[in-house]
Image (cartoon, rainbow, N blue to C red):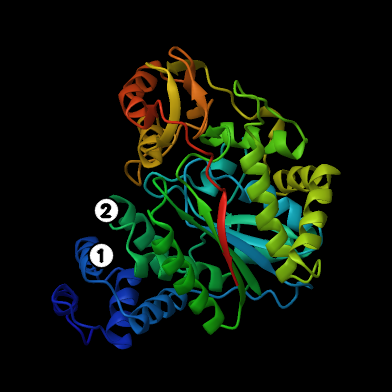
């Protein structure tokens, strides 16, 4: 090694700009095992506090991308398109939009991640389906996309191995929210997929890593610049995560929600509206932009109509069932929780807002997510939401229901959830789901 790891750490700690060679050597050294976790952790924390320039971020993305293989989809006809969400609570749209877009004619190769921090992970949701295997080799991944227009896998050892190690380390070293680390992690994996286009769902709010719309837009622009620099078509939607998305947060529960939506079912809550509606609408809007990038529809409105018809006709459900079959998943036997525990309002008023990140942390407490990379998720654990921002509630009304197989764990999350909701006498309007589209 021509660079001393400690010197590179010191340089970044002191606010210096790392060269591409220094970044490459450090990242590849970590991927190969010659640099230990504690030195990588130190560099991550230095980056967290000192940031990175545009050139450093590009260098980090390149180093992660070329730590492994780039998938060759030249044998697959059509415009390959994917979606990436920056993460939230109850964010399950991939399970709906993937089947919609694939059934409408565009190949959807997805290399997905596990839960990170307080946010859920697509792989964890899919693996709540008994037998669903997300660990497929790249040659089979390519073949399944060629035959079925869709396949969901986790990172293989060939795809961005540096990022896979760093991704897990960020989760347990409190360095998740760093803008350059987020950009490099997201884009290295997406570029390695061999896709032609990408739709970004960039979250803002109390349940997002970017707490304000301005920060979310900054992240979106950075991600788009990297994608465009590699010749990819890209669109970004800035979406609201000031409250959980949909009816459930929790892996098998979110699968049930997605299946219900693909069956065109509704769940009318105590306040008279469909608690699946925000999940459905965001899935359709993201699908429309994916289809538009792929040339399926000439306008966003036309692409939305195609997505809606694909969903309501049952084609998306059929494609999701096909997805489960090719991955070995048994959709008929998704596990159900043994216990439920209601949390009620202690006073009357209007819901002003949620501290959505705390709701995600409550999910970790009941084993719906991970506190450490070695934690085993309980697939049936989760939280059900009975009200949204702007709803009027009475004292004693149910706000949340905790679900799971361990009553002691469910009880441990009650204080966190009670503190995560703000109720007052002031009436507030319901927030917009989508703030802005960039493209």
State the residue position of label 2.
174
Task: Determine contact: label 2, label 1, CB under 8 Å.
Answer: yes
Residue 159 visible from this viewpoint: no
Picture coordinates of residue 29, whole percent (x, y): 30, 75
The residue shown at (67%, 43%) is 280
Quadrant placement of the N terminus? bottom left
Using a 10 Å C-alpha cutoff, classify the residue at mark 1 as few (fewer than 14 neighbours), some (14 to 19) or many (20 or more): many
Picture coordinates of residue 77, whole percent (x, y): 79, 73
The residue shown at (40%, 16%) is 407
Distance between the alpha carbons at the discs numbered 2 and 1: 9 Å
Taking the image as shown, residue 389 lies to the left or right of residue 52, namely right
Label of residue 333 in the image? none
Using a 10 Å C-alpha cutoff, classify the residue at mark 2 as few (fewer than 14 neighbours), some (14 to 19) or many (20 or more): some
The residue shown at (55%, 33%) is 248
Q: What element carries label 2?
A: loop
Q: Against 91, is 31 above or below?
A: below
Asked whether 281 or 401 is in front, the reply is 281
Taking the image as shown, residue 146 lies to the left or right of residue 377, namely right
The residue shown at (19%, 79%) is 8
Q: What element carries label 1?
A: helix
Asked whether 229 or 282 is in front, the reply is 282
Residue 299 visible from this viewpoint: yes
Q: Which of marks 2 and 1 is nearer the N terminus?
A: 1
Q: Residue furthest top?
A: 396
Picture coordinates of residue 168, whole percent (x, y): 36, 55
State the residue position of label 1.
48
């Amino acid at each position: 090694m021509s660079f001393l790891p400690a010197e590179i750490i010191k340089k970044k700690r002191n606010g210096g700009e790392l060269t591409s060679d220094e970044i490459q050597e450090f990242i590849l050294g970590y991927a190969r095992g010659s640099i230990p976790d504690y030195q990588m952790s130190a560099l991550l924390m230095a980056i967290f506090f000192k940031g990175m320039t545009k050139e450093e971020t590009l260098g980090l993305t390149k180093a992660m991308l070329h730590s492994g293989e780039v998938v060759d989809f030249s044998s697959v006809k059509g415009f390959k398109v994917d979606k990436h969400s920056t993460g939230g609570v109850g964010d399950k749209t991939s399970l709906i939009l993937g089947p919609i877009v694939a059934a409408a004619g565009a190949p959807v190769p997805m290399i997905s991640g596990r839960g990170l921090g307080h946010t859920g992970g697509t792989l964890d949701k899919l693996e709540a389906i008994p037998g669903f295997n997300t660990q497929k080799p790249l040659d089979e991944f390519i073949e399944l996309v060629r035959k079925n227009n869709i396949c969901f896998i986790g990172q293989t050892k060939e795809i961005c191995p540096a990022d896979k190690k760093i991704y897990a380390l960020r989760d347990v070293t409190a360095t998740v929210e760093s803008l350059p680390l987020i950009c490099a992690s997201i884009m290295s994996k997406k570029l390695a997929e061999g896709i032609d286009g990408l739709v970004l769902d960039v979250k803002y709010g109390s349940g997002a890593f970017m707490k304000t719309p301005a920060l979310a837009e900054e992240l979106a622009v950075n991600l788009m610049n990297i994608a465009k620099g590699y010749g990819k078509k890209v669109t970004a939607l800035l979406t609201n995560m000031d409250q959980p998305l949909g009816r459930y947060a929790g892996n098998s529960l979110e699968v049930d929600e997605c299946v219900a939506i693909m069956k065109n079912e509704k769940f009318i809550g105590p306040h008279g509206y469909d608690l699946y509606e925000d999940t459905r609408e965001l899935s359709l809007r993201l699908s429309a932009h994916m289809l538009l990038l792929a040339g399926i529809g000439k306008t966003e409105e036309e692409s939305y109509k195609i997505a809606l018809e694909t969903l309501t006709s049952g084609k998306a459900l059929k494609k999701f069932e096909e997805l489960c079959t090719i991955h070995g998943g048994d959709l008929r036997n998704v596990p159900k929780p043994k216990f439920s525990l209601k949390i009620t309002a202690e006073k009357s008023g209007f819901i002003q807002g949620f501290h959505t990140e705390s709701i995600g942390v409550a999910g970790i407490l009941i084993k719906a997510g991970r506190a450490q990379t070695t934690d085993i998720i309980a697939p049936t654990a989760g939280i059900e939401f009975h009200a949204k921002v702007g709803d009027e509630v009475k004292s004693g009304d149910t706000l949340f229901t905790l679900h799971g197989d361990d009553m002691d764990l469910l009880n441990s999350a009650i204080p966190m959830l009670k503190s995560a909701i703000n109720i007052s006498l002031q009436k507030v309007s319901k927030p917009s789901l989508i703030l802005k589209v960039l493209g």
